[in-house]
Amino acid sequence: MHFNSVVHIGAGKCGSTSLQSSLSHTPLLSDTENSQQYEYAVIRENGSVLRGAQLHDRLSPSGFSSVDLTHEVHSHLGMSEISNNIQAIYQENKIPILSCEGWLSRAHQFQTRKLLKQLSLNPKVVVYVRPPLEWINSAWWQWGAWLDIGFDEWLERQRKVVNWTRWIREWKALEGVASVEVRLATSDVVESFGQLLNVNLPKHQNVNIGSPPALLRFLQRHRQYRKGPHDNQIERYLITKLALKNEATPWVLSDELQVEIIDDLKESYNELLTFLPPREQQKMLDDARWWRAFSGEKRLAEVPGPIMTHHRSTDLKLSLWAKVYLLRNHFD
């Protein structure tokens, strides 16, 4: 089956924000060798589709992502309106590109609601994946630490998430999918995506940089400044105001957990190898982070939850600027 669209489905924490930022800033792409044009389009909360000048006029630093159409909250969206907007791209002899990192684990919902058929999509599906231990540690500090559940319960859920093979297999079986292209997020995702489509996709900027330990621990102690997993605007503000040193985020996986997670996933990741092109297969085989708990120096695990000891002067500065941030938002 020949593809008529490109659908990037994640995974989360695998370069999605950088890719969406680059696509939002350069939505029109040309494969001159094959005389093919692509256009990035974004499905919005109200069912409209942003493209061209609309996309540029509303541009944010992190770019735009389509909403997760499989959620019940979006079941009211006018599929015919979305389909008409996508048809307009087809009529201009362009191939639409859509992106939503939340779609990776939603193949079943796509099938149940026949979303691809409703939107006249026969996509080349693109997936980026990364080694599990670093993904879990990064995901804890982006999402898990700000939820009202314990680390053990959160980790149990994420161990299912990083079984990338399971989700890819479901997309491969999904009716209407032309092909599934799997790539490693351990290299430049924006460059890799451009190569996949044979287009020049300029990298806009690195928009999803991790926060330093002092800030993360401060926010854990003062949850009034970070109430939920998506309430992270204050982090960027505080990093800028205090010029905080960029250090590795705290490592929260014990030696025993690392061994357990890797052993549990080895069989799945052997199958994942078969989904990759030869060059990517070799990269994965050569990358110890996929196969061994301790791929470099051992990292001493810290407690995932709040640490009450802190550097008083740093905390005072963070507290002051956090209050300034809240006041500014209140009066804006």
Image (cartoon, rainbow, N blue to C red):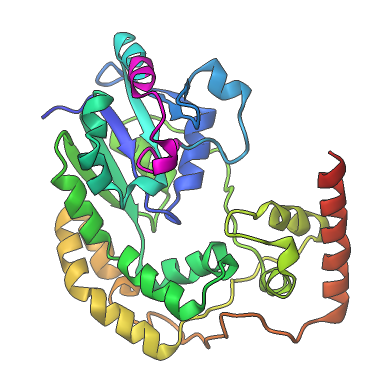
Q: Position of residue 196 (x, y in %)?
A: 29, 38
Q: Position of residue 138 (x, y in %)?
A: 50, 66
Query: Which image quadrant: the N terminus?
Result: top left
**Toward which corner of the image does residue 181 lie, by quadrant?**
top left
Q: Position of residue 147 (x, y in %)?
A: 56, 66
The answer to whether residue 51 is above or below residue 236 is above
Q: Nearer the viewer, residue 76 or 238?
A: 76
Horizontally, residue 176 falls left or right of residue 319, namely left
Residue pushed farthest left?
Answer: 1
Residue at (82% x, 52% y) in the render:
325
Q: Nearer the viewer, residue 148 or 34?
A: 148
Residue 276 visible? The answer is no
Residue at (82% x, 56% y) in the render:
241
Q: Position of residue 238 (x, y in %)?
A: 77, 58
68 part of magenta stretch: yes
Horizontally, residue 196 falls left or right of residue 327, namely left
Query: Magenta residues?
Result: 66-85
Residue at (43% x, 66% y) in the render:
135
The answer to whether residue 290 is above or below residue 128 is below
The answer to whether residue 87 is above or below residue 75 is above
Residue at (64% x, 54% y) in the render:
231
Query: Which image quadrant: the C terminus?
Result: top right
**Toward which corner of the image does residue 222 lie, by quadrant?**
bottom right
